[in-house]
Amino acid sequence: MKNLIKTLVQKVRIRDLDPNEAGEYSSGHLPQLVRHAALAHMPRSKGRVLDLGCGEGLLLKGLISSHPTAEVYGLDPWGEILLRAKRRMGRKVMLLKGDSFHLPFKDRTLNMVFCLNLFNNLAEKEEVIRTMREVYRVLAPEGYLIFDFRNTLNPFIYFGYKLAFIHDPEIKVPLKTHTLSWVKRSLVATGFKKDAMIVPLAFRLKLFAPALLIAAEKR
């Protein structure tokens, strides 16, 4: 049974996978879908853009292509994975080592911050809120936080994350889900506008979509 679950999970992860992402820790069908949707729906910006939790730089390449005049940064706490990003991006972006709770930027100096495939890897809800607050601090007025989360109300995601240790005992990060109602309340409480853009991914109904992409504007 364990081997069957592992095989099925691997097939889901490689479905429609970009060959340039094959073998990367951050690869997979849903993470790739999140990145593509974020690039398709992101507002245009000529300012400073941060990919928070940039990993191997899978999003950074798309950001450079779609925003050639933007000043792009990547930040991640894992030194080893930043080396992979450096090999992928060269000198096209500034890569920084750090976490989402203490961003090395002054107040109101960034125009857009991406947190893709990040909130599902933070152990506690309070860590998600701390990250939102820190992003809010560094965003300029009318700047955007663009992020995704895995949906608690999708049974495949919820139970898949609960049982993840069965098919992947080498998981290095927590796997957490959230509800849309909690995310919306947290954004408003942090100071973001109420009318955030919400894009369901892999399923049309927001209520049960496996993941949702959010673009929230700073008040």
Image: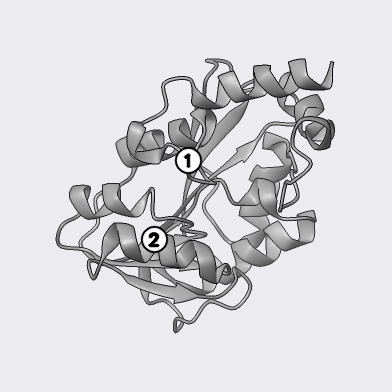
- Residue drawn at (44%, 84%), measured in percent from left and top? 106
Compute the Cα span from label 1 to label 2: 14 Å
Up-down relation of residue 142 to residue 160 (above or below): below
- Residue drawn at (68%, 66%), measured in percent from left and top? 130
The image quadrant where one finds the N terminus is: top right
What amino acid is labelled 1 in the image?
Answer: Gly
10 Å neighbourhood of mark 1: few (<14), some, or many (≥20)?
Answer: few
- Determine whether the residue tagged by mark 2 lies in a helix, strand or loop: helix
Which numbered dot is residue 85? 2
**Residue 88 picture quarter:** bottom left
Mark before the other along the chain sequence, 1 or 2 = 1
10 Å neighbourhood of mark 2: few (<14), some, or many (≥20)?
Answer: many
Which numbered dot is residue 135? none
Residue 201 located left or right of residue 126: left
Up-down relation of residue 114 to residue 120 (above or below): below
- Residue drawn at (52%, 66%), measured in percent from left and top? 80
The residue beneath circle 1 is 23
Image x and y of residue 110, in percent: 37, 70
Residue 195 located left or right of residue 50: right
Q: Nearer the viewer, residue 149 or 16?
A: 16
Residue 3: tell me if it is visible: yes
Image x and y of residue 102, in percent: 59, 78
Residue 219: tell me if it is visible: no
Image x and y of residue 209, in percent: 61, 22
- Determine whether the residue tagged by mark 1 lies in a helix, strand or loop: loop
Image x and y of residue 207, in percent: 66, 21
What amino acid is labelled 2 in the image?
Answer: Ala
